[in-house]
Amino acid sequence: MPSRKALVRRPGPRLAEGLVTHLERTPVDPALALAQWERYVGALRAHGWETVEVEPADECPDGVFVEDTVVMFRNVALVCRSGAPSRRPETAAVAKAVDRLGCPVGRVREPGTLDGGDVLKIGDTVYVGRGGRTNAEGVAQLRAAFEPLGARVVAVPVSRVLHLKSAVTALPDGTVVGYGPLVETPSLFGRFLPVPEEAGAHVVLLGGGKLLMAASAPRSAELFADLGYEPVVVDIGEFEKLEGCVTCLSVRLRHLGT
Ligand SMILES: NC(=O)NCCC[C@H](N)C(=O)O
């Protein structure tokens, strides 16, 4: 029976100072961000996910984007080393959390850099974005960590967006979804479905055909509903101002105890 736990991390007091790379900075409302985060966590719980809060990293503005700190393959954790130095102190408590959950833990080592947002898993295929946050050495270390476990690692050039998963994610049937103008190499993916909005490229699979999505992508939600899926919509507008999306606010752990 797959486990249904998800790591999350509460937004810290310096959230508004979070990094922005491909967007112009606009002011973030911390109280609204906290309320949005609570509703996001509530949506995970309402759909059967037990959320595990990682200890806060209050000195790190981007700590809430917990997805970037660790990559799971089956029950094995690879703790990341971000291409953004300000994000590196986020990982210590995450490593502790996955260790406490019984996962074998590896680490990306210098000079490698890897952000979890650059890693998209579809079955045993692990796509990894080589871009601003993940370098060639990080890709090589990801291969070394997961290929012996049966992963097929496919590297994807990323330059138009922050992370691979800012451009593409996948539906439960493995179809890759992305906003055309931001996807450099759709031919690398087996099946590619273009969506009408940038945020429509971001889905978190909640199980049973349910897709957690941002409220900023209503036409993509309609498209997915028309394909027989059930969008579960949350407003994450304050996190979108910092280039965050629904995927980056949690790490789902589906293979604990295996
Ligand atoms: N996986 C993600 O989509 N992470 C978003 C990270 C946003 C944060 N402001 C950053 O630039 O690192």
Image (cartoon, rainbow, N blue to C red):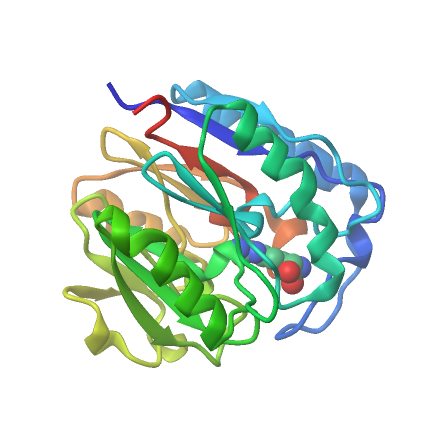
| Residue 33: percent from left, percent from top | 71, 41
Judge left or right: residue 205 versus residue 123: right
| Residue 119: percent from left, percent from top | 40, 58
Where residue 39 sits, quadrant-wise, is: top right
Total number of numbered discs in the rendering:
0
Can see residue 133?
Answer: yes
| 26 in relation to 122, above or below | below
Q: Residue at x 48, y 72 (%)?
A: 137
Judge left or right: residue 206 versus residue 93: left
The quadrant the N terminus occupies is top left
Where residue 73 sits, quadrant-wise, is: top left
Residue placed most toward the observer, 56 or 135: 135
Q: Residue at x 79, y 37 (%)?
A: 31
The quadrant the C terminus occupies is top left
Q: Residue at x 58, y 33 (%)?
A: 8
Residue placed most toward the observer, 191 or 106: 106
| Residue 80: percent from left, percent from top | 55, 54
| 68 in relation to 140, above or below | above
Q: Quadrant of ligand 1?
A: bottom right
| Residue 197: percent from left, percent from top | 40, 64
| 123 in relation to 138, above or below | above
Judge left or right: residue 142 versus residue 207: right
Can see residue 241?
Answer: no
